Amino acid sequence: MIISAQKEFEEILRSLEQETTIFLVGCNGCAEACQTGGEKQILKMLELLEREGKTISGSLIVDFLCDKTLIKVKLKAYEAQIIKADSLLVMTCGIGVQATAAVVDKPVHPACNTINIGGSRGEWRGEERCAECGDCLLDFTGGICPLTACTKGLINGPCGGAANGKCEFEPEVRECGWQLIYERLQKLKQMDKLAIILDPKDYSKMQPPPYLRSTVMWSLEQIAEETPVK
Amino acid sequence: MSFKELLNSDKFLITAEIGPPKGVDIEPMLSKAMALKGKVDAINITDQQSSVMRLGSLAGCCILKREGMETIFQVTCRDRNRIALQSDLLSAFVLGLENVLCLTGDYVGLGDHPQAKGVFDLDSVSLLQAARQLEQGYDLAGNELTGKPCFCLGATVTPGADPLEPQLIKMDKKIKMGARFIQTQAVFDLCRFKSFMHNARRLNNRVKIMAGILLLTKAKMATYIDKNIPGIVVPPIFIDQLEASPEASTLKTGIEIAGQLIRQIHEEKVCDGVHIMAIGKEEMIPEILASAGF
């Protein structure tokens, strides 16, 4: 399972500052289990955002947000509500946020920080990668993770080591992550995000907080004391 | 005049870089540096350039400083986390080194220890931020320092990057974080560089920009760089010149090309100075300067 924790509401609100109409996306997989993106949390978020004067054009919970085909099919039915929205707030792990960002032409904001993978990685195939850094930056990078897409994991823009959109390290297989981010931000008309100076990341957030350690899923993944075979 | 003071003057700035030894025989580094005394405004000592493990920049700078030379301490984010980086910045200051060039660093996979873990806890922008915060008397975590260091901070840019816009935006971040001078990646195509300078000046006209001058030693090297190093274009005319020279004098041709570039940049006031990179052939730097008319 992928362990996620909801960002502080203030941080979520800051990321939605420029926008008034939001579409909410939750996940019935790991995020439901972590109580960060299931039905209960979507309803709570809806209430909190409306209280702040936001309009919620609609919401949807997908069984597994790491499955891009499933997201596409599910979102299709909500097309009109998504078109109405300025952006999507996605309440799940970094893979789910990146998978959603890859299939919609709207800005996608992460509502959660991804802390670590429990027993296994996401359930479905896909090229999105999450570094479980606990301090999600997808809001600033067009829904493409700079930690995993950039070979060096740089967060403030590209180094000088890219040519023709490829990384100088293994150019035959590696794209320049910052080229992808640049193109995505251009497409989303969010180039101002490229100029934001990001503070050094807070790696202490990689440690699961006590409340997460108290979830059922967390305890299920703890290795029970082995009984030796007699 | 110190390098920091020169940044406030109109002087055409000249710096050069020297790679420290892979080992402890410091004699070649020292003699190459001594030959530059009085000819350049500061000498950069590289920090594990190309991710190849060598003697450190801090030690190299100290040795040169002892001999009365002005140095630029290069710091990359590849090998140290924020604790070690800040500590090394404090160490540099107490050892009398004030000029610091803040870089991201090459990826570890390109060097001679591809098994190593690339750190990149900070990036070039946040390294500048750390240095500036130390100057204000605090570390990155906000803890108070006893005594404040004072640096003269620099950064780099790849003027030939395509697309250029993200490079310019990042350079602007570096300037906002306190970079007072910029040493660029190697420049050969002056027409393209002038267009970069036009954009850079619109962003900021106070930061000192020094064009990177790389010594080409062979036609093969020029072709390799043109094809394999991102952001560097070597115009065919230079490759032809190197190809046309007899084998014994390609180095001389390379020196002339570098000299000619420096002369043109100086005469046409294209930017504020040059930074000479004669990798492995640093003893040729005085000849390059002579060929440029310095």
Image (cartoon, coloured by chain):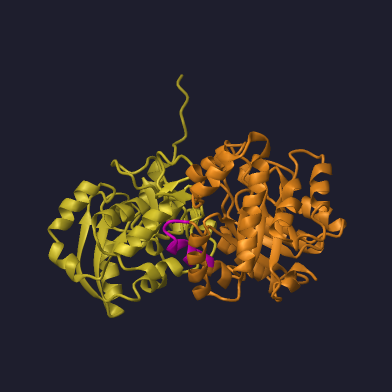
Chain colours: A yellow, B orange
Prevailing secondary structure class for the magenta stretch in the rendered image: helix
> Residue shown at 28%/49% (left/top)?
A29
Span shown in magenta? B161-171
Q: Give coordinates of residue B88: x percent, y percent.
A: 72, 57
Quarter containing the N terminus of chain A = top left
**Which of the two residues, A70 or A206, is positioned nearer the viewer here?**
A70
- On screen, residue A115 versus residue B253, left or right, reads left
Residue furthest to the top in view is: A230
Residue at 76% of width from left, 53% of height from top?
B286
Question: Where residue B219 appears, x then y in whole percent?
Answer: 57, 40
Q: Residue at x 47, y 24 (%)?
A: A228
Q: Is residue B164 magenta?
A: yes
Taking depth in this image into account, of A63 and B81 the one nearest to the observer is: B81
Can residue A131 be seen in the rendering of this structure? no
B260 and A62: which is toward the camera: B260
The verdict on residue B284 being magenta is no
Q: Position of residue A67 (x, y in %)?
A: 25, 46
